[in-house]
Amino acid sequence: MSKVLVTGGAGFIGSHVAEELLKRGHRVVVLDDLSGGFMDNVVPGAQFVQGSITNHELVDRLFDEHRFEYVFHLAAYAAEGLSHFIKRFNYTNNLIGSVNLINASVNSGVNCFVFTSSIAIYGASPELPMTEATRPHPEDPYGIAKLAVEQELQVCKEMFDLDYIVFRPHNVYGERQNIGDKYRNVVGIFMNQALQDLPMTIFGDGEQKRAFSYISDVAPIIARSIETPEAYNQVFNVGAETPYTVNELAETVARAMGVEPQIKHLPARNEVKYAYSSHDKVQKYFGAPQPVSLEEGVQKMAAWVKNHGARKSQKFGDIEVTKNFPVAWLD
């Protein structure tokens, strides 16, 4: 059994990765500041530590105490659109916090650092589907921070021989997602609105295309990646294959929630219109997972959401840049 750190393990993807690691016999320590996660998400059997990856003294103490063999870094504030307006917060949490973990991993001799990046690093690529060879051109601070961490890991491999694996998931949804966060996770936003008999709000015409990825398309591959040495120091897109428009997603969510689709179109915001990726490489290394269709995945999440009920939408507390801030987010 290996000793493993999972950052963000009280959050959505992190809790599922932690659960998969426990199933595979690893001893798991979860580090989470509960800013976007919940104690209910911490899986039984994991040791929970409340704290932030931005606290380098805490991070160093944890590494000294536990001597982790592997690190799975999933702690992040993954709101691409909002990241334009919270730049300091974004870079502190998503970049500096990651550097704290990388430093500690180098100093303590971690075997492999598994990093959850994002296809946000590609930006509005003319190449669709995006592949791992697609030139990165992030268009928001969130994507910039993720790409910087990827580059830092490459440098640390060359300088310190720290092995790493990078995953670039996209538009992941499923049970344990924070449906009360109105700035990210459109499937959860739609379901939360449906529970409250509110219209589903869509920025622009709704013809944006994404491949919405059910959690089981992503978490198990991330968790077992450390068992595949050939995957070390590689980058992988991971997620669903088939892209859908946001309008099609809204109709799918309405069916799953048992409501008539009420749609409210808001002014378009600055975002990538089409973003979906190829998964040929991840399937070559890890095999093709049994795909979960959008209809099936949304039905599964809807059953969980109905059981847990609506969450009050939380307003982000410290907007740093107010110019061009979407009016819909002011409520």
Image (cartoon, rainbow, N blue to C red):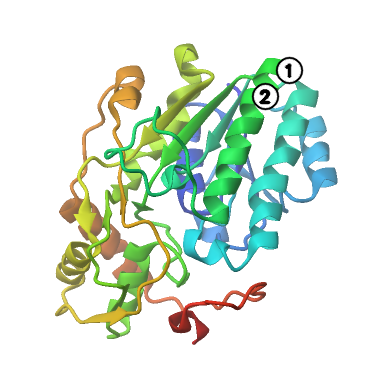
Position of 258 with respect to 153 (left or right) is left
Which of the 4 image quarters holds residue 100?
top right
Residue 249 in view, yes or no: yes
Position of 206 with respect to 315 (left or right) is left
Q: Which mark is residue 241?
A: none
Residues packed near mark 2 inside 10 Å, few (<14), some (14 to 19) or many (20 plus): few
Residue at screen point 27% across, 42% down: 240
Residues packed near mark 1 inside 10 Å, few (<14), some (14 to 19) or many (20 plus): few
SS at mark 2 in the image: helix
> Where 3 sits versus 19, above or below?
above
Image location of residue 179, percent across then percent down? 41, 68
Which of the 4 image quarters holds residue 249?
bottom left
Which of the 4 image quarters holds residue 87?
bottom right
Asked if the residues shown at circle 2 and circle 1 are in contact, with their CB atoms under 8 angstroms apart, the answer is yes
Kindly identify which residue carries mark 2. 155
Residue at screen point 72% across, 46% down: 96
Q: Which mark is residue 159?
A: 1
Amino acid type indicated by mark 1: Met
Residue at screen point 49% across, 58% down: 80
Amino acid type indicated by mark 2: Val
Position of 299 with respect to 304 (left or right) is left
Q: Nearer the viewer, residue 10 or 284?
A: 284
Residue at screen point 36% across, 36% down: 238
Q: Residue furthest front?
A: 126
Image location of residue 72, percent across then percent down? 57, 35
